[in-house]
Image (cartoon, rainbow, N blue to C red):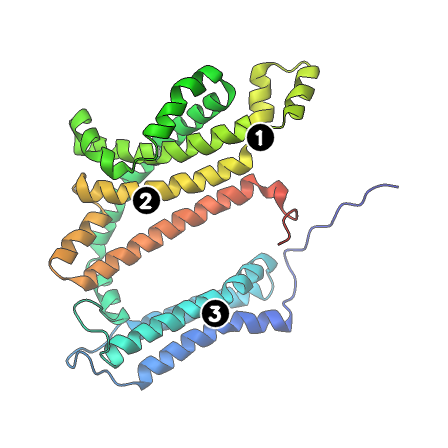
């Protein structure tokens, strides 16, 4: 009796009534925001006339309408939209509560808490500066990530496979690795005679530590039975490392990527605040010192958008690496 493989679900399929209702929840939240914003009078500050929050809501509704129409027929889009529906609705309700607490009632006072409309205004007004700061931050982050991941992957594999490499690298992991990059930054700047090179080294360290630690432990924990079978079949040590140990460590490698990326964000912010003279974190500090909190929030939201996008890309890579696990985890 032949084993029947599960059939793949079709990409094109009709949405059920329940799915349609769930996908309309974010649209209802956006429409509620628009109605509340238009209906309630603006009381704080008295001379301020909002220009951007209502158009922003209309744009968001238009974007979600496109997603809604596409999801009616395309199953992957519908699945994603249904999964995020309640969360997106909650975010928009939260923003409207923010709008009510600032512009509509004055409960939260300026200059510390600007309204969503004021933040969008500052975001548009400082668009060029935000782009320049973003490019500077991403450039430093990309270099640190690339170098740190390459070195971390190499040292992780060596520590997991070689007792000699583990003898020399393991003390560094225990002594140097746990110390935050902010502590090492002044030493790196002095050692490299450059604030940029020192900041880059701090990011590399923040990426190298979790990558090496997690990957080496995963390789050390490779099932001995797999290694013995490979040796019985005549596999060389290099073949076992490449085709047995590293593939066995792929789930841990995905976790190491996430930890490395998270560590790089903190190291980047520390480097920009204390070393490099450009970047989003430095702009946040400079604007905060002059109490221009509208611009501060604009830069912070730019950082949230960038880091969230990079994290989403990382999870997409993780899901691709672990695509064979689909269906194994049910809770």
Crowd tier of the residue under label 2, counting other residues whose Cα lies within 10 Å: few below 14, some 14–19, many 20 or above: some
Which residue is pictured at 46% across the width and 21% down the height?
Answer: 158
Left or right for 11, reference 182: right
Q: CA distance from mark 3 to mark 2?
A: 34 Å
Where in the figure is residue 98, as x and y percent of width and height? 31, 72
Label ID, residue 65: 3
Residue at left 50%, top 73%? 25
Among numbered discs 2 and 1, the one appearing first in the sequence: 1
The residue carrying mark 2 is 265
C-alpha separation, residue under disc 2 versus residue under disc 1: 28 Å
- Farthest right residue? 1
Quarter residue 42 falls in: bottom left
Q: Nearer the viewer, mark 3 or mark 2?
A: 2
Sequence-wise first label, 3 or 2: 3
Q: Label 2 near label 3: C-beta < 8 Å? A: no
Callout in the foreground (1, 3): 1
Badge 1 is on which residue? 247
- The residue lying at 73 percent from left, 50 percent from top is 7
- Look at the numbered disc 2 and give the secondary structure of its residue: helix
Please tell me the numbered disc located at residue 129: none
Is label 2 in contact with label 1 (beta carbons under 8 Å)?
Answer: no
Q: Secondary structure at mark 3?
A: helix
Q: Residue 252 placed where, x, y %?
A: 52, 36
Image position, residue 95 (x, y; %): 34, 70
The image quadrant of residue 143 is top left
Q: Is residue 91 above or below residue 146?
A: below
Q: Quadrant of the C terminus?
A: bottom right
Which quadrant is the N terminus positioned in? top right
Q: CA distance from mark 1 to mark 3?
A: 42 Å
């Amino acid at each position: 009796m032949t084993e029947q493989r599960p059939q793949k679900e079709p990409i094109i399929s009709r949405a059920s009534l329940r799915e349609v209702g769930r996908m309309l929840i974010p649209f209802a939240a956006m429409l509620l925001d628009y109605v509340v914003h238009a209906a309630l009078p603006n009381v704080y500050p008295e001379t301020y006339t909002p220009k951007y929050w209502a158009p922003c809501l209309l744009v968001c509704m238009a974007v979600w309408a496109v997603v809604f129409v596409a999801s009616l027929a395309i199953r992957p889009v519908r699945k994603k939209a249904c999964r995020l529906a309640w969360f997106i609705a909650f975010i928009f309700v939260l923003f409207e509560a923010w709008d009510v607490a600032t512009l509509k009632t004055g409960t939260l006072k300026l200059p510390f808490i600007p309204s969503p409309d004021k933040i969008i205004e500052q975001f548009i007004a400082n668009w060029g500066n935000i782009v320049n700061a973003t490019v500077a931050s991403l450039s430093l982050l990309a270099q640190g990530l690339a170098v740190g991941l390459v070195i971390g992957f190499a040292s992780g594999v060596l520590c997991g496979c070689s007792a000699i490499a583990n003898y020399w690298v393991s003390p560094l992991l225990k002594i140097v690795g746990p110390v935050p990059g902010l502590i090492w930054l002044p030493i790196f700047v002095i050692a490299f005679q450059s604030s940029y090179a020192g900041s880059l080294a701090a990011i590399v360290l923040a990426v190298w530590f979790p990558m090496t630690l997690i990957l080496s432990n995963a390789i050390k924990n490779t099932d001995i039975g797999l290694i013995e079978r490979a040796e019985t079949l005549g596999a060389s040590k290099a073949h076992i490392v490449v085709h047995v140990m590293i593939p066995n460590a792929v789930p841990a490698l995905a976790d190491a990527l996430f930890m490395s990326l998270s560590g790089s964000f903190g190291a980047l912010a520390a480097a920009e605040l204390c070393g490099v003279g450009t970047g989003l974190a430095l702009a946040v500090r400079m604007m905060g010192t002059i109490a221009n909190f509208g611009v501060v929030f604009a830069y912070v939201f730019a950082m949230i958008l960038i880091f969230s996008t990079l994290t989403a890309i990382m999870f997409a890579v993780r899901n691709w690496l672990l695509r064979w696990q689909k269906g194994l985890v049910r809770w």
